[in-house]
Image: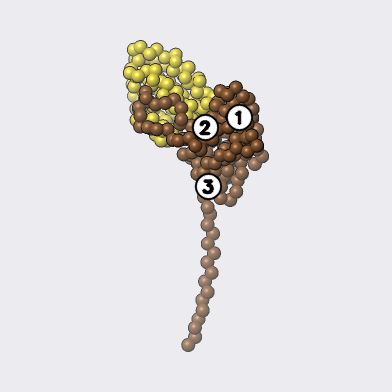
Chain colours: A yellow, B brown
Amino acid sequence: MAFKVTSEILDDVAKLSLVGELDGSSAQIFKEAIEELPTAGLKRLVLLMKDLEYMASAGLRVLIFAKQKMTHVDLYIVGAQEMVLDTIEKTGFHHSVILQDEYVD
Amino acid sequence: MEPLTVDGNLESLSAIAKYVIAAANAAGLDKKATYRLRLAIDEIATNIIVHGYTESDLSGSVKIEAQISSDRLRLILQDSAIPFDPTGKADPECLELPLEERAIGGLGVFLAKDGIDHFEYEFVAGCNRNILTVNLTVNLTVNLTVNLTENLS
């Protein structure tokens, strides 16, 4: 399934919904969405992943990029599917993000 | 299964994934094992395309071939990019480090090796060959022969 990301910014929270499959061919779309976010004034970056069916290391690299671009911003990963979560945990990324089943504003 | 040859660019990852999933289904792998195998092949193929070809200013193709036997599924990725042996690559250090301090690369080969049972590499006739193997569940058939001997006293 093709990868799609939609962004919504409200006050100091940016929410990105990720849909489809995130691999080396689609990671640039995700990176560009992160690059377009305003860094100043942002406190939370919430990644809604319930419709993300697949994520390769290319996706993890964008998470590193996001964290390094916005060091003062809390990164939430919400609703990640089982195997996507498996990848996040076995690579140690769960130590640096806030994992949630559902996001409450 | 017939091998598949694709161009060595990132747009080919989708076709490679479809092939792997078809091979996994034919071999009877469950959903999780299929995901891990697809991820493993995806990571190696991406490295071939990005580091082997594009960043080395080369172009070429990637061939993938599935070999299914009773006890294993082997997937062979073959390319003519610069020689690269992923088996020698050490696992990334410090998986516990915060993201701000992590190196950008190194995770692809780690995920590939983690998702399969055996990883081999060979360089043959100018081609890199990455051989990824998943063991299949062995169905054991036990033949039990009982001999009853009556000793009549």
Q: Amino acid at mark 2?
A: Glu
Find the distance from the CA under tag 3 to the CA under tag 2: 20 Å
Q: Amino acid at mark 3?
A: Asn
Observer-nearest of B67 and A3: B67
Give coordinates of residue B87: x percent, y percent: 51, 38
Q: Is residue B22 visible?
A: no
- Chain designation of label 1: B
Mark closest to the chain's N terminus, 1 or 2: 2
Mark closest to the chain's N terminus, 3 or 1: 1
On the rendered image, what quadrant is the C terminus of chain A found in?
Answer: top left
Quadrant of residue B125 in the image? top right
Find the distance from the CA under tag 3 to the CA under tag 1: 29 Å
Residue at disc 1, secondary structure: loop
Find the distance from the CA under tag 1 to the CA under tag 2: 16 Å
Report which residue position mark 2 lands on.
B43
Q: Are marks 1 and 2 on the same chain?
A: yes
Quadrant of residue A78 in the image? top left
Observer-nearest of A16 and B19: B19
Report which residue position mark 3 lands on.
B135
The local crowd at label 2, few if under 14, some if 14 to 19, many if 20 or more residues have their Cα within 10 Å, is many
Give coordinates of residue A32: x percent, y percent: 48, 17
Report which residue position mark 1 lands on.
B81
Can you say whether B60 is above or below B153 in the image?
Answer: above
Residue under the image location 54 percent in, 41 percent down = B120
Can you say whether A46 is above or below B24 in the image?
Answer: above
- Chain designation of label 3: B
Residue under the image location 35 percent in, 32 percent down = B96
Q: Are marks 3 and 2 on the same chain?
A: yes
- Chain designation of label 2: B
